[in-house]
Image (spheres, rainbow, N blue to C red):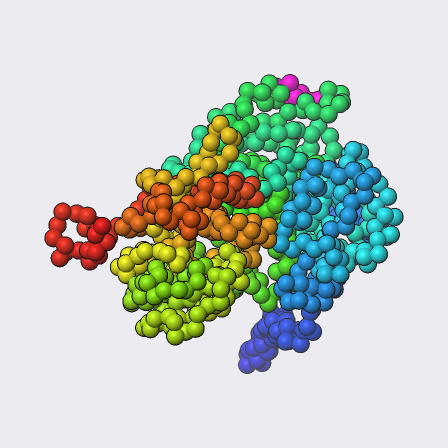
C-alpha cells in the first residue's frame, strides 16, 4: 500500500513537472529570448491570425488576400511594384542628402523647379502645382541653393491611355545632370497604371525620389519618406478655396440623410465588387446609395439586371443636394482609390447609426478644419507637402501632432519661432494658459525730433505711466538720424531707439528686444490716455489671438466695379482695426516677416502704406475672426484741417486710392477675403451710464 502511494506520488510529481516545463518553462524560455533578443529583431506575437493552422480549412491564405477585381496575389503585386520602384526601402536617412538643406540652417530649405520645355504638354493641374512652388517662400531659381528638386515634366497622369501621358520618361530624366537617381527630388502623381488592372506603375523608375501621390497603397507607401496627397480635379482652385459648409454651433448636427453615396458602378474589373455591394444598404429614405452603369463606351454590352433600375434611381437625386444634407458620406474605392479591402457594406448603417450627436458635430468640425487648413486649394496641398518634408529634414525643430491637428493648422505655425505650444496665442484657450501681464510699446517715428512739444513726447509720458508697460521701443524711420538719449524725457520704464531702415514694414519685424507676449503698436502722433491703454490691454488679455485697438475701418464689395472697396467712415460696422494704436501678440511679427511673400512687403515699403491692412488680413486669416474695437475718445477725424493737409499722408487722395488697391491685391494673394465684419465693441463697465463718476473706474474716457 505504501509502495503504491509512493509511486502514485512520484507519477503526480512527474506530471506536474511536465506541465511546468511546457507552460512555465515555455514562459521562461520566451522571457529568456526577449532578454537576449538582438537589437532590431522583431518579436512575433503568438498565436498569429495569419498562421495557416489557425485559418479555416476551406480558404487558402492567398485566396483570402486576393484582389477580387484582378485576381492578383499579393506577391504578384509586390513583384510588379519592385520592378518599377527599385528603391522601395528608401527612408530619409538612406535616400536623402541632408547636407544640401543645412548649409544655411532652416533658411537652406529651398526648392528648385526644372524649366519646362516648350514642346512639353503640361496639364492645368500641374501648372497650378508649379505656380504654387514658384510663389512660395521656398522657391529658388539657383539649383546650387536647392534642397529639393521638382521636375518640370508633368508626372500627374501616368495612365498610358491618357492624353496627358508623357512618354520616354526614363530616357529624359536620365539626361538631367541633377537627377542623381532621384535623390532629393519630389515627384507629384495623381493617376497611375492603366486599364484593366490599374496597378501603381508610373511607367518610369523614380529611383530615390520622394513620391507625393494620391491613392497610395499601404503596401507601397514608404513611411516617413513618401507623402500621401488627396486626388483633386483640374478645377480645384489655385488659392483660397471655398469655406467649409459648417456654420458655427450648427444644431442639430444630424441632417436629412444619414448616409449617402452617388457615383459610377463598375461592371467588370478592379473596383467592381466594392461598389456592386452598395445596393444592399440603400433604403431611399435616410440611407441613399446610388450607382450608375451608364459610363464608358461599352457599358450596354456588360450591363446586368440592376443597371436600368439603378440608372433611373440615380437620376432622381441631385448630388449637391445630397452632399449638403447628409450626416455621413460614404467613400468606396473606385478603379484606383482605397485599399484592397473594404469593410462589409452591411455593417455600415448600424455603425453610423450608433454615432452620437456630440461625436457627429466633433467629426464635422474636424473635417472642416482639415479642409480649410490643408485641402481647399492647390496652394495648400503643395505647401503642406513641402512643410511635411521640411519637418523631416529639420526634425529637431518641427511641428508636433497638436500643431498639425489643431486650428489654425500647421501651415500657419512656424516652428522656427518656437516649438512650444504656450508660445502661440491661438493655443492659450485650449491649454488653459493666460498671457503675460505686461506689454511692450513699439512707436513708429517718421518725423525728426525738433521740439519737446511734439505729440511723440506726450505719447511717451502717457504710455510709460501704464502699470502694465514693460518697455518702450522707438522704431526710428526718419530721414534724419535719431537724437541722443538725453533728448528724450526721463521715464519709469526702459527706452530703446532702434533703426527702422526707413522701411514701413520694419514696424512688424520680430525685434529681439520685444520680450513680452503683448505688443502695443503706436504711430508717433497717436493721442491716448493712460486709462485707454490700460483698458485695451486688459481686453487683449481675454482675446490674445486677435488685434485689439481703437480706430476702425471697413471693407465692402463694390458690384459696379467688381472689386473690393475700403472705407474710413465711422459706422458701427468694421473689419479692420488700425495698427497705429492696437494690441496684438508678438508672434504676428514673425508671421508677417516670414510667412507673407516678399512681393507684398515690397509693395508696402514702396508705397509707405497699407501695412496695417496687411496685418489685419494676416491675423483674420489665422483666426477666421474679426479684430476687436474698444472704447475710445473720438480723436480720428474723417478729414484733416487745411493746415495739416500737407504734413499728414492720409490727407492725400492718392493715399486712399492706394489703400483701395491694397485691399484687392491682398485678397488676390490670399485667394479669398479673410477680413470678417463685426459690430462688437467692448466698453468699460458703466461707460456713459447716467451714474456718478465716482462709481466708474475709467471715468476720464468719457471726457471730450
Relative depth, front residue between 615 and 498:
498
Q: Nearer the viewer, residue 467 or 169?
A: 467
Residue 305 in magenta stretch: yes
Q: Is residue 421 magenta?
A: no
Seen at 20% across and 58% down, the residue is 697
> x, y (%) of residue 583?
38, 57
Q: Quadrant of residue 694?
A: bottom left
Residue 289, image x, y percentages: 56, 29
Residue 104 visible in rendering: yes
Give the residue drawn at x 55%, y 81%.
2
How far across and how far down the image is residue 428, in percent? 40, 59
- Depth check: give the residue in front, 221 or 528: 528
Residue sitting nearer the eye, 329 or 577: 577
- Left or right: 166, with 558 as reference point: right
| Up-down relation of residue 81 to residue 488 (above or below) | above
In this view, the residue farthest toward the front is 643
What is the number of callouts on the image?
0
Instruction: Say which residue appears at 66% left-offset and 49% top-offset.
Output: 133
Quadrant for the N terminus in the image: bottom right
Q: Is residue 361 left or right of residue 205?
A: left
Q: Specify the quadrant of the image occupied by residue 676.
A: top left
Confirm whether residue 280 shows in the render.
no
Give the extent of the magenta segment.
303-309
Task: Please give the name of the residue rendered at 43% of the width and 73% of the height, measured from the top-left corner.
Answer: 484
* Residue 613 x, y percent position in the rendering: 46, 47
Amino acid at each position: 500500500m505504501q509502495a503504491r502511494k509512493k509511486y502514485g506520488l512520484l507519477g503526480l510529481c512527474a506530471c506536474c513537472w511536465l506541465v511546468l516545463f511546457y507552460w512555465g518553462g515555455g514562459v521562461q524560455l520566451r522571457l529568456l529570448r526577449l532578454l537576449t533578443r538582438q537589437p532590431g529583431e522583431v518579436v512575433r506575437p503568438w498565436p498569429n491570425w495569419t498562421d495557416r493552422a489557425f485559418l479555416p480549412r476551406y480558404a487558402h491564405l492567398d485566396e483570402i488576400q486576393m484582389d477580387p477585381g484582378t485576381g492578383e496575389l499579393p506577391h504578384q503585386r509586390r513583384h510588379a511594384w519592385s520592378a518599377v520602384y527599385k528603391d522601395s526601402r528608401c527612408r530619409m536617412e538612406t535616400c536623402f542628402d541632408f547636407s544640401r538643406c543645412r548649409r544655411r540652417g532652416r533658411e537652406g530649405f529651398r526648392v528648385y523647379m526644372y524649366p519646362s520645355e516648350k514642346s512639353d504638354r503640361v496639364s492645368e493641374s500641374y501648372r497650378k502645382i508649379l505656380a504654387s512652388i514658384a510663389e512660395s517662400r521656398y522657391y529658388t531659381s539657383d539649383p546650387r541653393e536647392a534642397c529639393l528638386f521638382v521636375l518640370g515634366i508633368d508626372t500627374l497622369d501616368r495612365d498610358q491611355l491618357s492624353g496627358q501621358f508623357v512618354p520616354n520618361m526614363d530616357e529624359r530624366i536620365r539626361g538631367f545632370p541633377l537627377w542623381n537617381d532621384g535623390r532629393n527630388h519630389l515627384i507629384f502623381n495623381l493617376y497611375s497604371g492603366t486599364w484593366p488592372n490599374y496597378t501603381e506603375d508610373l511607367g518610369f523608375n523614380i529611383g530615390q525620389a520622394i513620391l507625393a501621390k494620391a491613392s497610395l497603397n499601404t503596401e507601397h507607401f514608404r513611411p516617413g519618406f513618401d507623402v500621401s496627397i488627396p486626388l483633386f480635379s483640374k478645377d480645384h482652385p489655385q488659392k483660397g478655396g471655398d469655406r467649409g459648409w459648417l456654420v458655427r454651433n450648427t444644431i442639430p448636427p444630424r441632417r436629412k440623410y444619414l448616409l449617402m453615396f452617388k457615383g459610377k458602378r463598375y461592371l467588370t474589373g478592379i473596383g467592381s465588387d466594392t461598389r456592386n455591394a452598395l445596393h444592399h444598404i440603400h433604403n431611399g429614405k435616410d440611407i441613399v446609395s446610388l450607382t450608375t452603369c451608364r459610363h464608358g463606351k461599352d457599358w450596354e454590352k456588360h450591363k446586368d439586371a440592376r443597371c436600368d433600375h439603378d440608372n433611373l434611381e440615380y437620376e432622381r437625386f441631385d448630388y449637391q443636394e445630397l452632399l449638403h444634407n447628409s450626416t455621413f458620406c460614404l467613400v468606396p474605392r473606385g478603379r484606383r482609390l482605397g485599399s484592397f479591402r473594404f469593410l462589409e457594406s452591411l455593417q455600415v448603417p448600424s455603425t453610423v447609426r450608433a454615432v452620437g450627436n456630440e461625436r457627429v458635430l466633433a467629426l464635422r468640425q474636424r473635417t472642416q478644419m482639415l479642409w480649410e487648413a490643408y485641402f481647399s486649394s492647390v496652394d495648400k496641398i503643395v505647401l503642406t507637402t513641402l512643410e511635411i518634408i521640411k519637418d523631416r529634414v529639420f526634425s529637431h525643430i518641427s511641428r508636433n501632432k497638436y500643431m498639425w491637428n489643431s486650428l489654425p493648422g500647421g501651415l500657419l505655425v512656424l516652428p522656427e519661432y518656437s516649438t512650444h505650444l504656450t508660445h502661440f496665442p491661438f493655443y492659450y484657450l485650449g491649454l488653459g494658459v493666460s498671457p503675460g501681464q505686461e506689454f511692450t510699446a513699439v512707436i513708429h517715428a517718421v518725423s525728426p525730433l525738433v521740439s519737446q512739444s511734439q505729440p511723440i513726447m506726450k505719447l511717451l509720458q502717457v504710455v510709460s505711466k501704464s502699470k502694465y508697460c514693460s518697455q518702450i521701443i522707438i522704431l526710428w524711420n526718419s530721414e534724419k538720424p535719431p537724437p541722443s538719449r538725453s533728448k528724450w524725457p526721463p521715464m519709469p520704464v526702459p527706452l530703446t531707439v532702434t533703426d527702422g531702415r526707413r522701411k514701413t514694414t520694419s514696424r512688424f519685424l520680430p525685434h529681439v528686444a520685444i520680450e513680452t507676449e503683448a505688443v502695443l503698436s503706436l504711430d508717433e502722433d497717436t493721442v491716448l490716455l493712460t486709462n485707454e491703454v490700460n483698458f485695451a490691454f486688459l481686453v487683449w488679455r481675454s482675446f490674445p489671438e486677435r488685434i485689439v485697438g481703437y480706430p476702425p475701418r471697413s471693407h465692402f464689395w463694390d458690384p459696379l466695379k467688381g472689386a473690393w472697396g475700403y472705407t474710413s467712415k465711422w459706422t458701427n460696422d468694421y473689419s479692420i482695426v488700425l495698427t497705429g494704436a492696437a494690441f496684438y501678440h508678438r508672434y504676428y511679427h514673425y508671421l508677417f516677416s516670414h510667412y507673407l511673400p516678399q512681393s507684398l512687403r515690397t509693395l508696402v515699403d514702396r508705397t509707405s502704406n497699407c501695412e496695417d491692412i496687411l496685418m489685419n488680413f494676416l491675423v483674420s486669416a489665422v483666426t477666421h475672426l474679426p479684430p476687436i474695437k474698444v472704447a475710445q475718445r473720438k480723436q480720428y477725424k474723417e478729414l484733416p484741417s487745411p493746415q495739416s493737409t500737407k504734413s499728414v499722408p492720409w490727407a492725400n487722395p492718392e493715399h486712399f486710392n492706394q489703400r483701395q488697391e491694397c485691399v484687392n491685391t491682398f485678397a488676390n494673394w490670399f485667394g479669398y477675403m479673410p477680413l470678417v465684419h463685426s459690430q462688437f465693441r467692448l466698453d468699460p463697465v458703466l461707460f456713459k451710464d447716467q451714474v456718478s463718476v465716482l462709481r466708474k473706474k475709467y471715468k476720464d474716457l468719457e471726457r471730450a
